[in-house]
Amino acid sequence: MSNTLFLVLLTLVGGVAVTLQSQMMGVVDRNVGTLPSVLFTYGSGAILVGLIYLVARPGSLGEVASQPAFTWFSGVMGLIIIGTIGYTVPRLGLGAALTLFVAFQLIAAVVIDHFGWLGAAQSSVSVTKIIGILVLMFGTWLVVKQ
């Protein structure tokens, strides 16, 4: 299997996992609220990754301290992502919420790539990328409109 095919299949698994997690969190959010659903999601994830780390022993956690300061906010961003998904899915619907998430992710990614922010490889905005964003925004509007 080629490396590209493997990466495409891996993103397929990740995309399906995001969708399943979003719906599951939406149910928990609707039943008990946003903060308990975020705590439940992060808590269960922390327990699992802790157990995997103890078994696999993949490296030193001490090396994390030497990473750029901005990377320390990745966990905070995760909380924002999880909380926002949990809150918006039961209110907008799974398809609309995730379509908006993907559209705004692409816009943010293109801006970050264009300027090379946060350690990203610099990749200038092109007419093709702008057309792609406009097509995505039109598709987003079609999915989200009532």
Image (spheres, rainbow, N blue to C red):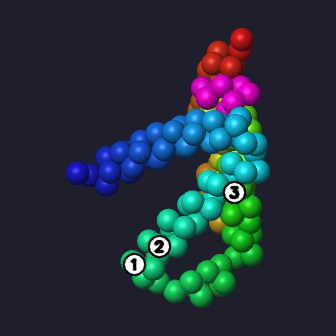
- List the single residue furthest toward the front: 31
Q: Residues within 10 Å of mark 2 (few under 14, many from 20)?
A: few
- Looking at the rendering, which quadrant does residue 95 occupy? top right
Q: Give the residue number, with chain letter if any, for mark 1.
A: 55
Residue 56: x and y, percent? 39, 77
* 41 relative to 105, above or below: below
Q: Are marks 3 and 1 in contact (CB under 8 Å)?
A: no
Q: Which mark is residue 39?
A: 3
Q: Are marks 2 and 1 in contact (CB under 8 Å)?
A: yes
The three-letter code of the residue at mark 2 reads Leu
The three-letter code of the residue at mark 1 reads Val
Q: Earlier in the sequence, mark 3 or mark 2?
A: 3
Quadrant where the C terminus lies?
Answer: top right
Residue 5: x and y, percent? 31, 46
In this view, the residue in front, 69 or 41, is 41
Task: Please indicate, yes or no, whether residue 141 appears anywhere in the rendered image.
Answer: yes
- Number of labelled discs? 3
Asked whether 91 falls inside the magenta stretch, the response is: yes
Question: Which residues fall within the magenta stretch?
Answer: 89-95
Q: Give the residue number, with chain letter if any, for mark 2.
A: 51
- List the single residue furthest toward the left: 1
Secondary structure of the residue carrying tag 1 is helix
Q: Main secondary structure of the magenta part?
A: helix
Q: Name the residue located 40 percent from the left edge and 78 percent from the top edge.
A: 55
Secondary structure of the residue carrying tag 3 is helix
Q: Name the residue located 72 percent from the left edge and 71 percent from the top edge.
A: 72
Q: Earlier in the sequence, mark 3 or mark 1?
A: 3
The three-letter code of the residue at mark 3 reads Leu
